[in-house]
Each structure stands twice: as C-alpha cells, then as structure tokens.
Image (cartoon, rainbow, N blue to C red):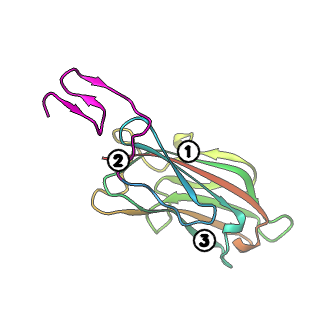
Amino acid sequence: MKGGYDPQWGYDYKAGIVEVTDHLELPYSLTSSFTDGGSVAIDARANVGYWKGTINFIDLTATALTENIKLIDAFPAKYKILEIMVDIVAAFDDGAGPVSACTLSVGWTAANYDDLIQTQDIYTGATQYGDSAGELNYTAVQGGIRPSWSAPSDIYARFVAVGGNLDTLTAGRATFYITYQAF
C-alpha cells in the first residue's frame, strides 16, 4: 500500500510515522489446559505476545514416573517462539518419600518433548531455565524458532520422576513464560 493510513497497524504509509497503541490485539490467542490456567498478555509492538502459565505439584496426577502436561493447545502454524523461560519457584519434591530426582523438559516432539528446554533438574532447588544457551535445545534462526510452518503444534511440559510416582509429590511450582510472534 502506497500512501494512506492503516488504522489496524497505526502506520501512516505516506509520512512513515508509526503510532504505537496498547490496544493492538493479535489475531489468535493461545490457550492452556492445566488447572492454574494460563494468561496471554499483548505487547504494544505489532504481532508480539506473551504467554504465562503455572504448573503446581498437585497438577501432576499420574501414578507413573512420567507425565506430559499440555501447556499450549495448537500453537499456530507459522508463529515463532522468540523466548522461553521456566521459573522453578519451588522444587518438586515428596518430602521423605521415594522420589529421589525429578526433571522437566519442554517441547512439541513426543519422543522427549525437549525441543525448547532440554531435560533439567527441578528436584534440588528453585532455579530458572532458559536464560542460558546450554539449557535450550534449539538454535534461534531470525530471532526464534517455529514449531511448524504448516500445522498447529501442541507444546508440552514433560515431568519425569525417579524412585516414585509423580502423584506422590508434595511440593513444587513451575511458571512458564513464552514470548511469541505472529505472522
């Protein structure tokens, strides 16, 4: 478009002036499927959004060593994940129970769900993951990673316990932060 004003994006093509508005909404919002819900915050920059969700130890109900929890249902095709951070607010532990270790990974490929965050310890203490390249399992191309160009992708957090089932945990809280870009 040459010349004119585009009210959706707040851009005056003739004058080359960009107006930033805090009412800009993405054409798609991300949803979560865990009990603590999830939230989407909209950035004033065009096409950038933030997703935040929390998983508590009580959300881990599997009488098994492994449980996959869907963080985002149908992350849209062509969308790019710009950043991911996981804040282990409280370590995942079962007190004096049989669990001797617990790990977390995040991704979309069912083999290990570790496309974004490699398998990390969440048993020994509160910490953050995603702020070091060694914790990420991808190389950012043009500032991020696209799970798929052609189809939506579900994003999962995989929890794995050693020595006891995940439903025996009595403590633990992880908050996930994802910055994404729409096209």
Q: Is residue 98 above or below residue 48?
A: below
Question: Per the image, is 13 magenta?
Answer: yes
Q: Residue lying farthest top?
A: 15
* Foreground of the two, 64 or 28: 28
Q: Residue at x 28, y 36 (%)?
A: 7
Where does the image place residue 138, in percent across and percent down from the top left? 43, 48
Count of marks overlaid on the render = 3
Question: Per the image, is 80 magenta?
Answer: no
Please report contact status of discs 3 and 1: CB closer than 8 Å, yes or no.
no
| 21 to the left or right of 40 | left
Q: CA distance from mark 3 to mark 1?
A: 21 Å
Q: Which residue is mark 1?
A: 130
Question: Which numbered circle lies on residue 182?
Answer: 2
Where does the image place residue 73, in percent across and percent down from the top left? 45, 64
Q: Amino acid at mark 2?
A: Ala
Residue 122 shows up from this direction:
no
Q: CA distance from mark 1 to mark 2?
A: 21 Å
Question: Which numbered circle lies on residue 67?
Answer: 3
Main SS of the magenta part reads: loop
